[in-house]
Amino acid sequence: MSKDFTWSTGSEIAAAVASVETTALAVTEQALAVIAARNPTLNAFTAVTAERARAKAKAVDATGDKSKLPLAGVPFAVKNLFDIEGLATVAGSKVNRAHAPAKRDAELIERMEKAGAVLVGALNMGEYAYDFTGENVHDGPSRNPHDFTRMTGGSSGGSGGAVGGGMVPIALGSDTNGSIRVPSSLCGIFGLKPTYGRLTRARSFPFVGSLDHLGPFARSVRDLAISYDVMQGFDADDAACVDRPQESASPFLTRGLEGLRVAVAGGYFRKGASPEALGALDGVAKALNARDVEIPQAARARAAAYVITATEGAALHLERLRKQANDFDPAVRDRLIAGAMVPSTLVVKAQIFRRWYREQVLALFKDCDVILAPSTPVTAPKLGQQNFTLDGVEMPVRANMGLYTQPISFIGLPVVAVPVALKPLPIGLQIIAAPWREEVALRVAYALEQMGAVSAPRPNL
Amino acid sequence: MPSPPLDDFIAAAAATLDLPLDPAWQASIKANLEVTLRHAATVAEFPLPDEAEPAPVFRA
């Protein structure tokens, strides 16, 4: 009987395939069997591409020098807003099911497979990514692998559940306001939201063009770094993708913390945080000897991100709202219709504030290399839970799980989300770096992982 | 009884934008619009010089 790779990292699998300890096909068959066994409970996958995966795995096994493939035989899956050749790109919606099948994979899928990875399917998500819960009225909710009665967080809920639940070692998702960092927190895994413009979004379904990012989830920092490295590179098919040289992060992981100045965000980023979030933050801040820093006007930054999201999202979906409003998730529909009605003067004000705020925050990085902040105010809420109480104020879960993530993605800063393995439920922290310094955030995350301060806890499944 | 101003605004905006407006959606759309406008007001009231430029296509 071959070794069980269910909870192996991607780098361990790639090493085993390269050394012919196992085959890509054997690993793929294991992953497909685990997905078949666990998906009825976790509801992470909306499509499984079994035949395609077997064909790709056989091609990897037939490759001569597999050591040149950093992800040789590593199963991965993608949020269902990525184009997969032959499938309609549903983006969590009912409306898009009528779309023609995609003619070509998303660029990031092509780059992952070029590195030897094997796509095994598409993952559940909140409708059109306007969501922090991971619930979906059409496909049913993604379920948290640590407690099936709880949310994964969203909108990349299936990505969180699939990686946290041991179905794949690596998944891809999108993050407009927190949709990688929130499910990473609630599912107890690592996530990377790179700098805005770093990874191409070509052939993925958009939400808010000026805020959309794509990135990986994994159960180890090294897997984040490897997948991030193979996905880098300019792509003229994404108007926001910046033409920068390849800046590999993997070689920097083991450099340790020496010379790095760590700060921890106070003020806004502590207000409303649960004892679990504060305890996790303070523990890691202490381990890194972090000093306090205040991110100025973070509440207004979050408010401005909220306005830009509502209005840009509404503009994207205006025609669908006119013709097919009844096919939307009612909660998404009503937010988008409201967004369509916001006066444009207020949107321009938000964009003016955005540039001012960016300058203030970038100035902070003269005195520090990374800033720590919570990813979410609380651990995973119950499925269907509408409201929670933060700092004595009751507010909707769906709109407010991203309180601490929105002011950061608003100005495109790179963030590594790291899990603190609290019992019974994990919670995540953000390691925020200056633009284009993903390798610094990954280096700090790796050091924390080596210390045992952060880790992806394995659920009882 | 006269409608509150936001109800009138929503009705006028829906008609102008050619958006459907089922009476059953009104309360939810209004609640969402109130929150978004409240957020927008906190941003708009923040004093910045006339020369401050917007970031319509954002580059980090």
Image (spheres, helix red, strand yellow):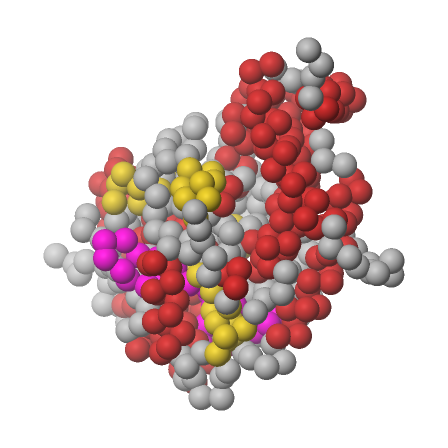
Task: Judge by depth and name the residue closer to the eye, A338 or A162.
Answer: A338
**Residue A23 position in % (x across, y down):** 27, 60
User: In the image, is residue B8 above or below residue A304?
Assistant: above
Which quadrant is the N terminus of chain A positioned in? bottom left
The answer to which quarter of the image holds residue A3 is bottom left
**Residue A219 position in % (x across, y down):** 33, 61
Which range of residues does the magenta coloring cover? A416-443
Q: Is residue A133 magenta?
A: no
Q: Could you tell me which residue is drawn at 64 percent across and 54 percent down?
A: A300
**Residue A371 position in % (x across, y down):** 51, 71
Task: Judge by depth and name the residue closer to the eye, A130 or A44.
Answer: A130
Task: Judge from the rendering whether residue A63 lies leftward or rightward of residue A237; answer left or right.
Answer: left
Q: Is residue A431 magenta?
A: yes
Task: Judge by depth and name the residue closer to the eye, A22 or A88.
Answer: A88
The answer to which quarter of the image holds residue A448 is bottom left
Q: Could you tell me which residue is drawn at 64 percent across and 68 percent down?
A: A361
Q: Could you tell me which residue is drawn at 52 percent across and 64 percent down?
A: A267
Task: Judge from the rendering whether residue A401 lies leftward or rightward of residue B38; answer left or right.
Answer: left
Task: Judge from the rendering whether residue B51 lies leftward or rightward of residue A457; answer left or right.
Answer: right
Farthest residue to the left: give it. A1
Q: Could you tell me which residue is drawn at 70 percent across and 50 percent down?
A: B43
Farthest residue to the bottom: give it. A259
Q: Is residue A385 visible?
A: yes
Task: Judge from the rendering whether residue A295 lies leftward or rightward of residue A222; answer left or right.
Answer: right
Farthest residue to the front: give it. B1
User: In the image, is residue A112 above or below residue A310?
Assistant: below
